[in-house]
Amino acid sequence: MERIPILQMGDLLLVTIQVDMHDQLALTLQDDLTEKIRSTSARGVLIDISALDIVDSFIGRMIATISSLARIMDATTVVVGMQPAVAITLVELGLTLSGVRTALNVERGMKLLQRTDEDEASS
Amino acid sequence: MTASSGSLPIRIEQDVVLARQAARQICVACKLRLIDQTKLVTAASELARNAVIYGGGGTMDWDVVEKGLRKGVRLVFADNGPGIPDVAQALTDGWSSGSGMGLGLSGSRRLVDEFELESAPGQGTRITITKWS
Amino acid sequence: MAALQQRTIDLIRSHQEPLLAAWVGSLTDAGRAQDGRLSARELDTQVREFWRLFLGTLSATDVSSLARAEWQDIRRFLEELSRERVLKGFNSSETASFIFSLKRPLFEVVQQGYANDPALLGDQLWAISELIDQLGLHTVTAFQKTREDVIQRQQEEMLELSTPVVKLWEGVLALPMIGTLDSQRTQVVMESLLQRIVDTGSEIAIIDITGVPTVDTLVAQHLLKTVTAIRLMGADAIISGVRPQIAQTIVHLGLDLNGIVTKANLADALALALKRTGQTVTRTAR
């Protein structure tokens, strides 16, 4: 069965979605990711969607779910690389993805994760 | 190369991906702007999924339409499922109702230029959406 | 209603070569092919293609309406022709003459063929005249429509140019909006702002509406949707130049600003943006 690869970099997990996912593939990713967060005790998850030119309500919900599940396991999720047309469409669809952090690219996403870590450490 | 009109069965969730791709191809052929393509293909994704999950499977028909000299893409999603009991309610944002269908349906309406819904209990559902270039 | 007789159609068919020669001749005579915008060969191709479609569609049907399905291919052909002429800089009468100059050669063929039948001659000349007029009109309409589209696209491009997205500082973009905005233009401009944000990796976009006299519901909603989209992508936006009247409109419309920061002027917005991006400007002793 095809799966989307998850890269581990220290205590960070990086997922780059580059295919047009059917629903089952998305759900498999969700399961794989949550399992990997658990097994690696990851502190951060970076989901790169810069190759996605369509994000519909199912994928949107998947992203929000991953973010919530990760938070329960003490990891922060940042979604990066959202294309402008996708952002406009999500707004029109009414999908706010509230609770999901986003950044323009992987570099900024990592900075954001770092800042979050530091904030939490000092509190 | 997609012909300017055609039909695609939507029975299983993998067909939703095919529906997206077909919608994309016809949008490109009609030279819709990128943002309009994105909106239509996203709407197609929502409605195709609804047809699979709530309609027990159905079809997506596509057509190039003309209004004077303007071109447009028209998609029809039809299924013989149980139908929608309360159309008005289904069209209000159902995000919090948990049914899942609500957001896809009302959201799709906002993404397209023309939206027609015919549905009644026991009579299946037929949704026609159009996006103009 | 005039209908083209089969006899007329056969006449046209059997005289096509001289007819085409006469047609192309009158097109070239008027210099319509020799001006470099259109080569003789291109014109010849178009003439032949049109002729192929024309003959193929002619039948003893009522030619009173071009809207009938049988004429669709020719309509499309003429639309394409007009589009190409617009882009090449022809004017509408030059373009329509492609069709209208076909009248005379057709008349001559029909006149010869019906020389002994004046009553029918008049009727058939009328039928041809009606047909050519309709084809010509369709060409002109298509020409005008394409020209309008081209002008609109140029306006959009000019709008993007005249509403430039400016890099104010490292990681800070500014979009000064000027004049009354309509929904369509606002959308175009906003989309290009989003793209610039992605291209430059800027964290903050300042949308300055100092130069906008009024903001109606649609534009306000559009502004808000744009800011929401900017945040979804991972950047943020500040709206500056919000005058009291506009603030009132926003409140009056019951629009939820959703935590979007507004500033009275661009300078304040920049100061905030710098702070947010962790940059400072220091004054040195002089």
Image (tube, coloured by chain):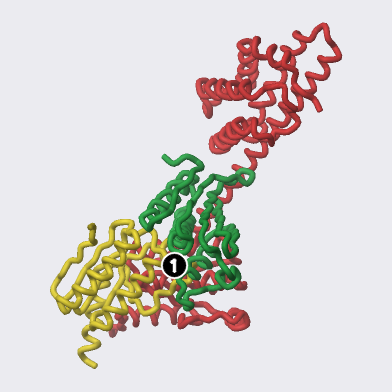
Chain colours: A yellow, B green, C red
Q: Tell me residue C60's x, y (percent).
A: 72, 22
Q: Tell me residue B21's x, y (percent).
A: 40, 50
What is the secondary structure assignment of the residue under circle 1? helix
Q: Which amino acid does label 1 sit on?
A: Leu
Q: Tell me residue B91's x, y (percent).
A: 56, 69
- For the C terminus of chain C, the quadrant is bottom left
Q: Tell me residue A89's x, y (percent).
A: 46, 64
Task: Determine the residue positioned at 51% across, 65% down.
Answer: B105
The image quadrant of residue C79 is top right
Of all residues, the one furthest to the right in this rendering is: C119
Q: Can residue C227 be seen in this view?
A: no
Residue matched to label 1: A90
Task: Determine the residue positioned at 64% across, 31% down.
Answer: C71
On screen, residue C18 versus residue C1, left or right, reads: left
- For the N terminus of chain C, the quadrant is top right
Task: Determine the residue positioned at 53% across, 49% down.
Answer: B73
The image quadrant of residue C108 is top right
Task: Determine the residue positioned at 27% across, 83% down.
Answer: A72
Of all residues, the one furthest to the bottom in this rendering is: A123
